[in-house]
Image: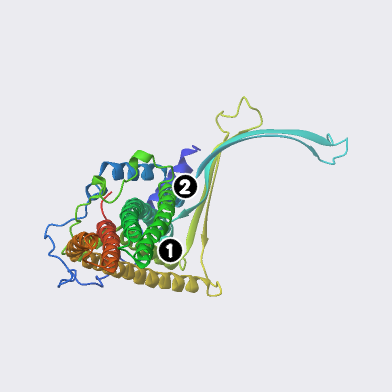
Amino acid sequence: MSVRAPLAGLSALALLAGCAGPLEPLYHRPSSPVPAAFPDGPAYRPQAPDASPLTWRQAFPGRKLQSVITLALDQSRDLRVAAAQVETARAQFQTQRAALLPKISAGGQALYAREYLGLPASVGPPDFNLTEYAVSLGASNYELDLFGRVRSLTRAAFYQYLASQSGRREAELTLISTTASDWLTLASDKSLLQVSQDTLNSGQKSLDLAKARLDGGVGTALDVANARTVVEQAKADIARYTTQVAQDINALNLEVGASVPADLLPSGLDDPDAALPRTPGALDSRVLLARPDVVQAEDQLRAAKADIGAARAAFFPSISLTGAGGFTSATLASLFAPGTAVWSFAPSVSLPIFSGGANLAGLRNAKAQDRIAVAQYEKSVQTAFRETADALAAQGLMSQRVSAQQGLVDAAAESLRLSTALYERGQNTYLDVLTAQRTLYSAQQSLLTTRLLAANTVVSLYQVLGGAL
């Protein structure tokens, strides 16, 4: 008999197995738990109807910043971990998918044995030598997926694989945003350091003038002491910001995964590369459905639905097939001679009758995990909506805040100029100069803080809108 007969039977039964459908529930995306449009009002600026998420190169057009982000995408260890997790999920999916097909294996065997028969010498020899050669090709314990258990498990593994890909994209999005934020923080602290140095220089000049007036008999020791307070405060701030700049560079190097070249570091917030375009908002909250974390939550929800199908299939019979075909002979030369063909075909059926409630518990667990996945998906959408609404509110009036803060700096600078001129002519006390110096110094620091906040709103909007990579 030909060895192709059992193998053809296996193929036919495998095709038959594909006729039965899975028992998992049909997937329907949950209704959106958030409004269709983002909030509006005094805190928000008008939104462009055609707004769409920007790519990171559009959001961060500066050459230096783009180079640092590119370096981070190439060197970040966190991103390497995320990539490895994707490969792990892919391998797990491929392993599960392999269960849909029979595992065919080939084997060969040579047997050499001596057996003792225990016969008397008058009847025959007491023992004899046995030699046997065999080759075979067959499948073992192949499950006919009549009720979709294996297919449901394969779909669950596939959606987990897709979820890992979304997780990697989320990691990339976070890496880009964090790198940009760290770079801008370094720029801000460098500007604050420069303001402290300028204040020290200005304060030192005022201190020298106060000392000269004291030596000339027209000033007071109080004026000198007051002038020294500005100088000492500036010195303390210089030391503080110098430390912060060093720590900012360390944090940026860690985020990037490599030492950032000095020529790619910002000179300050006035660096042209630190100027960021305003990220457009979106009128329709459906844009959030493309956010990587939301997509990941939906993939995990799909996987949970597939797990329900596998749990339901556990209540039905399981049919497994084992079959093999080959040749066997007492001599190697006649192994493939006519009449040496052999085959075996052994189907088996397992019907669950009593499992102590394990199958029912498994189904209840799968349904509970599905409810958890639904809630997590809805929460991810709500979180995305809240984060985007907050970012839109933060950016809405930011230009007015920066403009007002700049006006405060200009007014404080003019006040210091006038107070100093009057003091030099003896028409004013040094207390007015000291007040103007402190007001200007504080206003300059606040302006830089506000400008950094404005830049970070662009970074935040890029991230919360799920900016394109």
Q: CA distance from mark 1 to mark 2?
A: 19 Å
The image quarter in which residue 40 lies: bottom left
Q: Position of residue 376 (x, y in %)?
A: 36, 69
Indicate left or right for 120 with 152 as reference.
Answer: right
| Residue type highlighted by circle 2 | Pro
| Image point (29%, 70%), residue name | 382
- Crowd band around label 1 with a 10 angstrom C-alpha radius: few (<14), some (14–19), many (20+): many
| Residue type highlighted by circle 1 | Ala
Q: Position of residue 411 (x, y in %)?
A: 18, 63
The label nearer to you, 1 versus 2, is 1
Q: Position of residue 432 (x, y in %)?
A: 26, 68
Indicate left or right for 391 with 309 as reference.
Answer: left
Look at the picture and state if 63 lies above or below 281: above
Asked which secondary structure carries label 1, the reply is helix
**Residue indicated by mark 2:** 102
**Residue indicated by mark 1:** 310
Asked which secondary structure carries label 2, the reply is loop
| Image point (58%, 33%), residue name | 340
Sooner in the amino-acid sequence: mark 1 or mark 2: 2
- Please count the marks in the image: 2
